[in-house]
Image (cartoon, grey):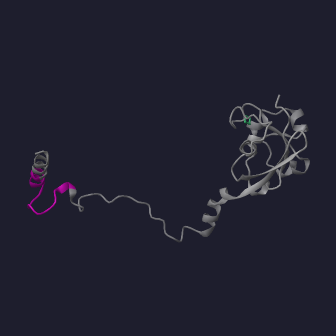
Amino acid sequence: MNVFVRRHSISRVMNANCASKNSWPQFLNSASRPMPTVPIYPASIIQPTHLVSSLEFLKMAKIIYRDSAGREHVSDVPSGHSVMRGALDAGLDGILAVCGGAAACGTCRVKVDEAWLDRLPAPEDLENSMLDDEDRAARIRLSCQLLVTPEFDGLVVEIPASQF
Ligand code: FES
């Protein structure tokens, strides 16, 4: 019974909207519907270099974490991840990262190996605001602000026994 009512209603709508009984109602007529706007990118715009650069995140860098006892832990950290995250993912102790990487807690401090000090990007204002002169003299950086790139491969950082 419900099926009959529904079919009957549809045919009434069709009859009301169509010039002839065999054509579709006006609202289903493709000629009257606006064409969907789908951006079309010519193949010439998409270059192989774009594909390569979009795969940058798949590149890894070996980060060497030295703990307070002098043991070294080598971890493959994907590009775009922070040195802090690499340590946490590897299950290393000594980094708390209470603020989750917002440069607000200062509990992700690491000491950068002297050979790497000039090879890393300089701290930005946010990170600088969390460090004092003593920290800078001791090569301390916030590991959450060190975003890994392939150029970080071989970076050595020391993790303190405690962040406090
Ligand atoms: S995780 Fe909080 S400052 Fe780095």
Q: Whole-percent x and y of residue 12? A: 9, 50
Q: Whole-percent x and y of residue 104? A: 72, 32
- Horizontally, residue 43 falls left or right of residue 24, namely right
The quadrant of the rendered image in which ligand 1 is seen is: top right
The quadrant of the image that shows the C terminus is top right
Whether residue 99 appears in magenta in the rendering, the answer is no
For residue 54, which quarter of the picture? Answer: bottom right
Residue numbers of the magenta segment: 11-27
Between residue 56 and residue 67, name the one nearer to us: 67
For residue 91, which quarter of the picture? Answer: top right
Considering only vertical position in the picture, is 96 above or below 115? above
Between residue 78 and residue 71, name the one nearer to us: 71
Residue in the image at 74% along x and 30% along y: 105
- Horizontally, residue 74 falls left or right of residue 24, namely right
Residue in the image at 29% along x and 57% along y: 34
The quadrant of the image that shows the N terminus is top left
**Extreme-top residue of the structure:** 164
What number of labels is visible? 0
Residue in the image at 16% along x and 56% along y: 25
Q: Whole-percent x and y of residue 97? A: 73, 35
Whether residue 12 appears in magenta in the rendering, the answer is yes
For residue 55, which quarter of the picture? Answer: bottom right
Residue in the image at 13% along x and 45% along y: 2
